[in-house]
Image: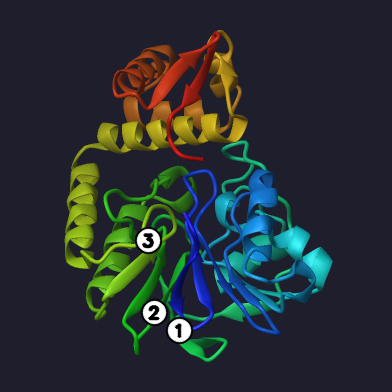
Amino acid sequence: MAPIEILDDLFFIERGFLSGNHFVYRSQDPILIDTAHITDFDTTKQAINGLGVELTSVRLIVNTHTHCDHIGGNKFIQDASGCDIALHKIGKHFIDTHDDWSTWWRYFGQQAAFFTCTTTLEDGEIISIGPHKFQVIYTPGHASDGIVLYNQKEKILISSDALWPKDMGAVVTRIEGSRALFDMAASLDKLAALDVKIAYPGHGSPFTDITEAIARARQKIDTFMGNKEKLGRDLIKKIIVYTLLEHKAISEKTFFIHLMTSHWFKENIDFHFGKSRYETIYNEILSDLYQRGIIQRQNGKFVTTVKP
């Protein structure tokens, strides 16, 4: 999809579910919002260059949170340009202390690289993306350091992974804490209080049915609060698909072993379902994803049909 100019010289670039969507403010001092996944950096670079912006001229990167699919280009771009990078203060702490657990990277076996965070963002402050003013709104739940950006004048919300049009980002209580669902519900309350004409999510296309999206997310949260197994299945399905996106394809014979050697898989099954149900839950979830066409078998390997 071609970049969409959402405000003068501020472009939205839609990606898939391996790389988060991102934004480019085109000027003599370019500004980026999120930088996708490290393994897709060539595509990210092409998209930025296609708007007439050179990486060496980037002045600032603003990240909505420090998950691997939103910060993947940071180090490459900072090394090329010497740019500043702005994060919520919790995200800055993660990066400053090289915490690859709280950022999910090591926990899920994801690829990412540390960089230097130079600027702290506070809840409620106004930042300038060129001439465009955005309010920083702290939205924990999916990510402890998550923020959204709101342009009150044009009623535009850069909702990142705090609000998607049809679904919601994974909730990882083993990292974000047992209050993560409550934090997410409170974040939705913040978003519901805004006057939003259009939202640009971290994954998926722009959407205007803000009230409906919030209602769907609230319903899911209520369901998950009342059923720990449903929360576990949602998380495990999402991370299995993400693992396939990151690795492109994994052998049917070794995929279960691959998951069993990770930090996250056994722990989340133990927590959400009870001890030692690893292979049973794996088979149930793989069968469901296969029947729904979300994963396929190709030459003895599992692949996903989800757009990378």
Give whichever of 63, 30 is nearer the camera: 30
CB within 8 Å, label 1 to label 2: yes
Which corner quadrant of the image does residue 287 belong to? Answer: top left
Kind of residue sitting beneath label 2: Tyr
Q: Which residue is mark 1?
A: 134
Give how far across and how far down residue 14 sits, in percent: 47, 56
Mark 1 and mark 2: Cα distance apart in space: 5 Å
Give how far across and how far down residue 47 sits, in percent: 62, 59
Which corner quadrant of the image does residue 232 belong to? Answer: top left
CB within 8 Å, label 2 to label 3: no
Q: Residue at x 50, y 63 (%)?
A: 3
Closer to the eye: label 1 or 3: 1
Q: Earlier in the sequence, mark 1 or mark 2?
A: 1
Residue 188 visible? The answer is: yes
Q: Which residue is mark 2?
A: 150
> SS class of the residue under badge 1?
strand
> SS class of the residue under badge 2?
strand
**Image color mode:** rainbow
> SS class of the residue under badge 3?
loop
Q: Earlier in the sequence, mark 1 or mark 3?
A: 1
Circle 3 crowding by C-alpha within 10 Å: few under 14, some 14–19, many from 20: many
Q: Residue at x 33, y 50 (%)?
A: 168
Kind of residue sitting beneath label 3: Ala
Kind of residue sitting beneath label 1: Phe
Q: Residue at x 61, y 71 (%)?
A: 32
Circle 2 crowding by C-alpha within 10 Å: few under 14, some 14–19, many from 20: many
Q: Residue at x 39, y 65 (%)?
A: 200
Q: Which residue is mark 3?
A: 162
